[in-house]
């Protein structure tokens, strides 16, 4: 359930008409509902009930400060993959002891920054990274808390670009080989081994692959304990999918029950890193129709949002529902909804039957709260769009629209070219 619903013919976000926000901030813009964010977080959190756990929201899905703040106020931690995300999490009020740092290519400066906080743990993705973190921790006179991100070789049955837990993927350490790395980690002077982690992919719509992964992790924990290596945290990553179109992913309750069932008496704190399932359906992208035209073979609806604002359809061929902000009786026609960018790959929908759009009207691109703004760019020198948060009957611009000056911020023309 989410808070983007029609009242009569008008689309509302909680108690605010979307049109009213468009009049105030212009288009395009991202729009989030605080109530949806909170209720999704709480549904996920409560699904794990009495099991000792920390929900570390995955900042890559949506890293706006106000959005992160919603979760840190509810006691959530943050899963980060860069120094920049650590900085954001801290600015949003996250407790460092609830930050987990994943990522396949951590740079030395990022490692130093993370060690200065100090965070809950590094999810380490290679033996070289392990040794480097140990060295840096030593030079700073501290100890690095670590878990190894293992690759359990489980097929998550999702888009290849967001599958991460297969042997052929660049992520994590092969689960079989990881025992050697754990033994090494346990001997390093500036490293404290505390956990095991994994993340097998995103937009999973079945519990089976999660269960398979957790079974392999459980076996690994038993093996490590037999080697005298203490494991106190099991981080199962994120990945639970949402309904964009016809998908029927499991409810967080069903997902949590399936995982907990595999871990009786495990005596560990469970860490979960959900992203999409919390924010995906808590946000929309609002765009205006600039023009409509009939091509040789197709009808086009040209809107003011483009692949630089929401890249998911172009990158993964993914489906985003599109609906009018103002409903009225009209015929439906087959269209491509496209943006102004100079690429044929710039589309938000292809071959989609939609109510015949009119120039100047507003459309809502639904389920755009995850991997929407965070994956946006300035391609074609398009200023990035604002982000707006609705709280009951009020709305707040939580990131302003970029201006032309922002586009060249930090650039300069060298002396010989002047
Ligand atoms: C390490 C890690 N944790 C968590 C997530 C969040 O995944 P999702 O948004 O599918 O829940 C990702 C996303 O790819 C990830 O790479």
Image (spheres, rainbow, N blue to C red):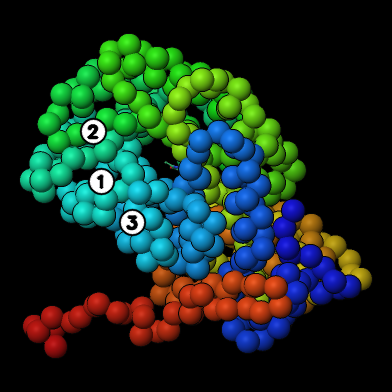
Say which quarter of the image contains residue 83.
bottom left
Residue name at image x 57 percent, y 74 percent: 388
**What SS does tag 2 mark?**
strand
Query: Position of 151 compared to 14: left or right?
Result: left
Write the residue at 38% across / 55% down: 95
In the picture provided, is 172 more to the left or to the right than 52? left
Disc number for residue 192: 2
Q: Earlier in the sequence, mark 3 or mark 2?
A: 3
Quadrant location of residue 322? bottom right
Is the residue under label 2 in contact with that under label 3 (CB below 8 Å)?
Answer: no
Q: Residue furthest right?
A: 329
In terms of image quadrants, where is residue 337? bottom right
Give the percent coordinates (x, y) of residue 49: 62, 38
Badge 3 local density, few (<14 within 10 Å), some, or many (20+)?
many
- From mark 3 to mark 2, how far is it between C-alphas? 20 Å
Sequence-first tag of 3 and 1: 3
Q: Position of residue 52 (x, y in %)?
A: 51, 35
- Residue 206 in percent (x, y) is at 64, 30
36 versus 156 height, above or below: below
Residue with the mark numbered 3: 86
C-alpha gap between disc 1 and disc 2: 18 Å
Which marked residue is nearer to the observer: mark 3 or mark 2? 2
Gap in Å between the C-alphas at discs 3 and 1? 12 Å
The structure residue drawn at horizontal position 61% and vertical position 22%, both measured from the top left corner, is: 261
Foreground: disc 1 or disc 2: 2
Instruction: Residue 365 in the image: state x and y as whole percent.
Output: 67, 63
Give SS at disc 1: loop
Question: Label 1, on which residue?
Answer: 106
């Amino acid at each position: 359930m989410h808070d983007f619903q029609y009242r009569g013919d008008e689309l509302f976000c909680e108690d605010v008409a979307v049109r009213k926000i468009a009049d105030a901030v212009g288009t395009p813009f991202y729009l989030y509902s605080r109530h949806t964010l909170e209720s999704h977080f709480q549904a996920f959190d409560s699904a794990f009930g009495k099991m000792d756990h920390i929900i570390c929201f995955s900042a890559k899905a949506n890293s706006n400060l106000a959005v992160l703040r919603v979760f840190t106020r509810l006691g959530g931690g943050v899963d980060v993959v860069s120094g920049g995300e650590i900085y954001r999490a801290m600015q949003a009020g996250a407790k460092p002891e609830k930050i987990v740092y994943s990522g396949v290519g951590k740079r030395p400066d990022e490692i130093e920054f993370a060690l200065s906080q100090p965070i809950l743990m590094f999810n380490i993705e290679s033996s070289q990274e392990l040794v480097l973190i140990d060295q840096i921790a030593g030079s700073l006179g501290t100890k690095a808390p670590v878990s190894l991100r293992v690759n359990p070789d489980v097929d998550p049955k999702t888009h290849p670009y967001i599958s991460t837990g297969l042997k052929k993927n660049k992520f994590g350490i092969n689960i079989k080989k990881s025992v050697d790395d754990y033994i090494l980690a346990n001997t390093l002077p500036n490293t404290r081994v505390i956990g095991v982690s994994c993340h097998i992919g995103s937009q999973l719509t079945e519990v089976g692959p999660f269960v398979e992964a957790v079974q392999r992790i459980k076996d690994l924990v038993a093996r490590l304990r037999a080697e005298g290596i203490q494991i106190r945290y099991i981080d199962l990553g994120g990945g639970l999918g949402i309904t964009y179109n016809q998908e029927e992913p499991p409810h967080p309750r069903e997902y949590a029950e399936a995982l907990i069932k595999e871990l009786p008496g495990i005596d560990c704190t469970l860490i979960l890193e959900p992203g999409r399932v919390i924010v995906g359906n808590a946000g929309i992208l609002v765009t205006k129709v600039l023009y409509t035209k009939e091509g040789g073979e197709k009808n086009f609806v040209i809107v003011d949002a483009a692949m630089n604002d929401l890249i998911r359809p172009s990158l993964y061929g993914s489906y985003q529902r599109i609906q009018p902000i103002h409903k009225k009786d009209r015929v439906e026609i087959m269209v491509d909804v496209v943006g102004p960018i100079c690429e044929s790959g710039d589309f938000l929908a292809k071959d989609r039957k939609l109510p015949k759009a009119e120039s100047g009207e507003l459309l809502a691109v639904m389920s755009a709260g995850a991997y929407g703004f965070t994956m946006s760019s300035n391609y074609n020198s398009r200023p990035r769009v604002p982000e707006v948060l609705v709280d009951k009957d009020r709305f707040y611009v939580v990131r302003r629209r970029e201006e032309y000056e922002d586009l060249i911020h930090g650039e300069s023309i060298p002396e010989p070219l002047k």
